[in-house]
Image: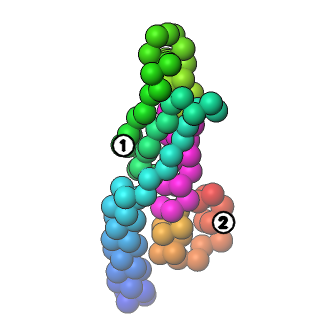
Amino acid sequence: MFGDMMGMMGKLKETQEKVEATKKRLDTVYLREQSSDGLLSVSISANRVIKELTIDDRLLGDKEQLEDYLILTLNKAIEKATKVNETELAAVAKEGLPNIPGLDSLLK
């Protein structure tokens, strides 16, 4: 029984290291989102850090329109990055967890 505990602790530590490595890798995974007309685009890492924002000059004359574009496009970019982040981290975490019935449904 003690050996099982030590093995499980080692597996958990290994999984934690894999999760940390995945987080670092996700810093280098970039996603691009743009407004439907292409006047505003955002580049975001899978860890949800904005890396680049491009605004067409035509949006600069209307503050309210620009704000609307920013809100919509940034939210879409964050949603996309969150999905990639959660999928990648859940896959790594699931690999290292023991096979406990019902546990996999918690990771979805």
**Percent x, y of residue 108:** 63, 57
Check the image and name the residue furthest to the front. 57
Q: Secondary structure at mark 1?
A: strand
Q: Quadrant of residue 49?
A: top left
Tell me the kind of residue under disc 2.
Gly
Residue at x-position 42% and y-position 86%? 4
Q: Quadrant of residue 72?
A: top right
Determine whether, in the image, residue 8 is placed left or right of residue 97.
left
- Give the residue at mark 1: 51
Residue at x-position 35% and y-position 80%? 10
Start-end of magenta stretch: 74-89
- Foreground residue among 9 and 44: 44
Residue at x-position 66% and y-position 66%? 102
Of labels 2 and 1, the one closer to you: 1
Residue at x-position 47% and y-position 26%? 56
Examine the structure image and report whether residue 81 is included in the region drawn in magenta.
Answer: yes
Label ID, residue 102 = 2
**Percent x, y of residue 26:** 40, 58
